[in-house]
Amino acid sequence: MQAVEVKSFLEAKLPGTQVEVEGEGCNFQLNVISDELAALSPVKRQQQVYAHLNPWITDGSIHAVTMKFFSSAAWAERT
């Protein structure tokens, strides 16, 4: 599994969301930039992403995922 696959998949499934992905193989770190997701509780944010990644987690293609969530304004201030 490549980071670019995870990025393009999640961005297609979560419209209006930018995903920056680091890692390779089966371990990934995600920076998820979305005003919509940033407004949700931390648990709800993760549930939204895991709902799309679950098939890959179940088949072992992805083993570990860490996520950080940012609003677009917070991301712009960070970079």
Image (cartoon, grey):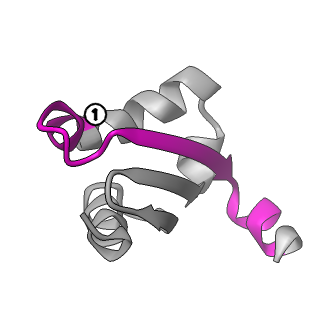
State the residue at coordinates (47%, 62%): 17
75 sits left or right of 49 in the view = right
Q: Residue 74, percent across and down?
A: 81, 61
Task: Give x and y (percent) for residue 31.
Answer: 60, 58
Residue 41 visible, this angle: no
**Eyeballing the image, is 66 above or below 25?**
above
Which picture quadrant has residue 2? Answer: bottom left
Q: Viewer-proximal residue, 14 or 5?
A: 5
Q: Tell me which residue sits at (69%, 65%) in the image.
A: 72
Which residue is painted at 82% across and 77% down in the image?
A: 79
Query: In the image shown, does 78 or 63 lie closer to the viewer?
Result: 63
Q: Residue 27: in sight, yes or no? A: yes
Relative to 53, say whether 73 is above or below. Answer: below
Q: Position of residue 4 (x, y in %)?
A: 34, 76
Question: Going by the image, does 38 lie left or right of 63?
Answer: right
**What residue occupies the far right of the structure in this picture?**
77
Residue range in magenta is: 54-76
Q: Which residue is at a point 24% across and 63% down the rendered structure image?
A: 1
The kind of residue tagged 1 is: Ala
Q: Is residue 5 left or right of residue 70?
A: left
**Residue behind mark 1:** 51
Above/below status of 71 relative to 51: below
Residue 53 lies in quadrant: top left
